[in-house]
Every structure is written in C-alpha cells, then in structure tokens.
Amino acid sequence: MLSGLLTQVFAQEEDPARIWNVEIEGNKQFEDLVIKRYIANERPPLLKRIFARRSAGMDVDMFEIRRDVIRIERFYQRRGYPFVEVRFELTDDGSPKRKELTFVINEGAPLIISAVEIELNANDQTKSFITEHPEYQRTVRRVPFREGRRFQQIEESEVVGTFTRTLKNIGYVYANTSVAIKVDSLANEAKITIESTPGPRTRITTVTVEGNESLSDEIIIRETGLRIGSTYTETKIRDAQREVFKHHLFRLALMSVPDQPKDTTLELNLRVKELSLRSWRNRFGVGDFDRLDETLSFGNSWKLVRAQSTWVHRNVAGLGTQFSTNIRASFYEKELSAEYLIPYVFNTKSSLNISPFIENRIEPSYSITTGGLINTLGYEYNRSLTGTFSYEFALNNEYDITEATNVNVSEVLPDSVLNYNISSFSFNAYYARGLSRGKRGLIIQPYLEFSGLFGESTFSFQKAALDVRKYTELNNKLVLATRVQAGAIYYSKQDSLPADIEFYAGGTNSVRGFSRRDLGPKRAIVSEPEPGSRQQTVNFVPIGGKAMFTFNVELRQQLDRLLKGFGVATFLDGGQVWSGLKSLSSREIQYSTGGGIRYQTPIGPLRIDLAYVLNPTDADLDVLTGIQDVAGRRWRIHFSIGQAF
C-alpha cells in the first residue's frame, strides 16, 4: 500500500507532456497562420519554452485538441467546404515530454453558387424607386454572392446587414432582409435568394428628449441637426447621435425608434445624460526630459515637474456654451488661458472658440512672454475631414536673445529685448482615411498662415507646412509607421524674423537623435573659464530657419506573448532646418537611428527611445575650433507618454 502511494506521489511530481510545436498539413485554400488564429493550441513563445517547467497552459490536453479539430472543421464549413475532414497526430518532438501536434486537413470539394436572385416584396412603384436609387444599385453591384463563386456562410450576415442598412438609408426604417439557401448536395451547388421587405417610407415628425436637466429640448434637438419632416435615414440618426454625444455637456446620447404603428410618420426618442455643470481638474507629473541641458541630478530634477489646473463651467446661461480657465506651470513654460466655446454657429458641424492667453516660455536661444487673443472657427465636414480658420493677435516680448559678436562666437545679452506684435490669419485642415487603432490608415494635415495682410503686424510673412502620416499593418503584431513634415516661410524683407516665428526640428516627437529644437543651424556661446581653470566651455544653441524638412520611419512590434501590453520599436529619423529655401544646398540632411520599448498603460503607451546621430556636425557635438569637446552628444534618450506620431 505504501509502495503504491509513493508511486503516485512521484508520478504527480513528474513533468507532464507539453505541446512544443503545432503544424498544419493538407490545407490548400488557407495559410497556416490564418487557421492557427482559430485554434487554442499553439507553439509556446520563447520564454515559456525556456521556463517550460513553470509555465502553465502548455500541457497536452486531449479535450482541447478535439475541440480544435471541431474549430477547424467549422472554419472550413463556414467558408464553403461542407465535406471537410480533420484529424490530428501527436508525435514526439525530440523528447517524449515534448510533443508536436499536427492537424491533417482533407478540404474536400467546395460548394459553388449556381444562381443568385434578389427580390423586393413591395408594390411596383416602391420597387421602381428603390431599384433606381444609386445607393441600392451600388449595394447590388457589391454583393459578395456571385454565380460561379464559392458560397461562404460567413458572408450571409454581411449581406443581410448591408441590404437592410441600405434600405434604411433610403428611408425605410422598418426594412428587413433574409437570405434563403437551396443546396444541391450531389452537384455541390447552392442557389441563393436575397429577399427584402422595405415596409413604408417614413418621415421624421417628432423628436422627444429624455434625461436633460439644464439644457432645453429645443437646443438639444437643434444640436442633432435633424429637420422635422425630413426623410428618415440610418446615417442621419447615427450622425445626430454622434453630434449630441460630442457636445461638452453630455456623457451619454442614445437615439432610438420607440414602438409605434408602422406607417409613414416616425417618432424618435433621444435619451441623454448630462455631466456636472462645473468641474475642476488638477494634474501633476514630470516631463521635458529633452529640454534639460545639464545632467539630471537631485538638485535639478525639480525642473521636470509639471502641473496643470483646469476649471470648466458647462452650459453658460443655459445656451449650451462652455467657459473654462486653464493654468499650466513648469520651469520651462507658464501659461494662463481662458476659453469660451460656442458649439453651434450656423449648423452642428461648426463651432467657435474665443481664447485669451498669456504665456512665458524658456527656449535654448531665447525666452519669450506673449499674450493675446485667438479666435478659431472650426468646421467638421465629415468624420474624415475637419478644418479650422483662426485669427490671432498677440503682443510678444523676446529677451535673453543670442546675438552674434563675430563670425564664430556669440553670447547671451540679457538686456537685448525684441518687442513685436503678430496679427495673423491661419488655416489648418485634418484629413484621415482608413484609420484603425494606429495600425493602418493615412493622415494629411496642411497648414497656412498669413501675417500682416493689412499692415497691422510688425512683420509681414506667409508660412506653409504639411504633415503626412501613413500606417501600414504588415501582420497582426507588426506595424510600419511613416511620417513626412515640411514647411517654408516667405518673408520679403532682408532682416531676420523673430526666433519664435521660425521653424525648428528635433526632439521626442521629431528627429530623436537631437534634443528639442536642436536640429539645424546654431550659434556658439562661449563662457569664460571659472576661477583657477583655463578651460572655456562652449554651448551651441539653435537659431531656427525659414525652411524645414523631417521624416520618420518606424517599425512597431507588439510582444504580447512575452508580456501583455509590451512592445518594441526601431526607427530611422532624418531632417534639416535651413535659413531659407535658397539655401537648401548649404546643409545636408542629418540622420539618427535607434530603438525603444513601449508599454501600454491606461493613459497611453509609455515610451522610452534611445537614438544615435549618424552624421552630426561639430556644432551638434559642442566642438569649436581651438576648444576641446566637453562631451560627445551623439546619444539621446527620450521618455514620453504616447507614440512619437
């Protein structure tokens, strides 16, 4: 009895057999990678293979293997292979405790569509109206069921949803669609009938509002953009709900069709839930790592502390407008601003922002205090295209300006002050296509600014810039992200523009081999030796330019199997800043490369990047003729929240 008990104990301590590899054989229509997404058993990731003794979820589970057989069969059946057969083989993979699991597939003959019929259950007048409508014709042309193609059951729900949505977008709120399939098993053929019943075409006669406490029904209904008496469409209702939801006062907006007689009149119900009328939010954190010139230590770490306080009053005077104040403070930036938001100007897509502000910033080559007023008219043409038109008037005071004293050396003159005003009109647009959670899509953002059009500004200039971003999903875990930025300033006068107007490049979200604004032409600041030392120190500060170009290429790899939310990236950045368009040949493009890690947090991906400059200039390395280089500056490390672009 004791012997049997000991045998049982040792058997429990013995390592169980583990799944070490998973293979697919016999599949002709679908790739291995596609099929493996639908099964539970998988090849263990590297760390689990290294620490196999302690890793859970790798044991051979016959029940789960048989379920995977059923999953593969259903996968094929729903894609037009009703006679598929799947079996599995479990063999040793170099050791009795390491098993290779192989699924062997016999796909069988596919089910082919022999005929497709599309029917409308309606009178002749309704049939004629629907079949001649461009949206319905487009849906018919794009139906995935085609004669001679393989019948895939997974497309059935898509067809039903597409035809039903199309009819609802034409005004038939009670429309429904069904798909009938007649299969000839001997001939491996299927006849498809798509049948739609549109019901009556309806017009919106009433919109009722529930849940509002401080804002009137009339203003909320106006915010929907719906017109009483207009024809119902699914798109209108979806857009109306979105317009109300994006209003600053509401945390919930739900548009629905309540139970009612199915006739040509329609009552809609809008249920909303308001946010508190007043709120106060305080935030504290650290940042500006790439603005700290000296080595980080306990004595200067306070320069990285940032704080922000925002007070918001929603629904001012019951008009649906919003007033807010904002204070931001750090060593490098202090700002006090207010904002009055009018969310409805001439329709729901338009809004107006009136924002007075005063700000102080410390940059490497100058400091600036500026204050003024920005008026911004925004217009959302659709979900993919938005634009803003702004007018800004600001009084500016630049000081601690770096000025050249000879060809090679310059110094900081604290008493030098440049006072000027800016009166400019600017236009900014945002176009996005096919965006999907940062994995794919295209973003285009042009910018134009015209200052001093009527002689009311100290400087008259025109500025143009363009930002283009492209995201390509190479596979389920790998994304190629690219960005190109370019800009130019036209200024007819010979003397230079103020430093704050010109272009700069480099930093956490730009060319990462450089610190913030550090790429491009520079001026040298040479300090006198300290008492008892003969060593002079030199520091180069950026002076900006009237032309700029940068690019970024980044590969982003998710490693969820290693650690959930973890990822890595490798990148190549490049760019340059020039004094003007005529001097593009005077400075070559400079490049930096590197890599980093990403970890997804509730507030966005935590990002750490390490970059190396490939072709720095002497100024980038703080090297001046006759003066010893103090420290190499080819490496940069960046800490941030959010992707670089």
Image (cartoon, rainbow, N blue to C red):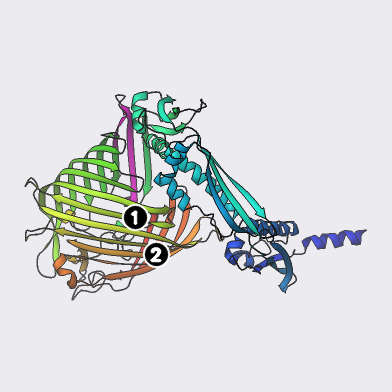
Residue visible at 43% across and 48% down in the picture? 137
Q: Which residue is mark 2?
A: 554
Query: Would you place residue 472 above or below residue 329 in this image?
Result: below
The N terminus: image quadrant: bottom right
The region drawn magenta spans 297-325
Task: Provide residue 242's location: percent of width, then percent of height.
Answer: 40, 38
Query: Would you place residue 16 above or below residue 623 in this image?
Result: above
Q: Nearer the viewer, residue 396 or 317?
A: 317
Q: Amino acid at mark 2?
A: Glu
Q: Is residue 358 left or right of residue 319?
A: left
Quarter assignment of residue 19? bottom right
- Residue 603 can be seen, yes or no: no
Q: Which residue is mark 1?
A: 443
Q: Amino acid at mark 1?
A: Ile
Circle 2 SS class: strand
Q: Is residue 301 magenta?
A: yes
Task: Provide residue 27's location: percent of width, then percent of height.
Answer: 63, 67
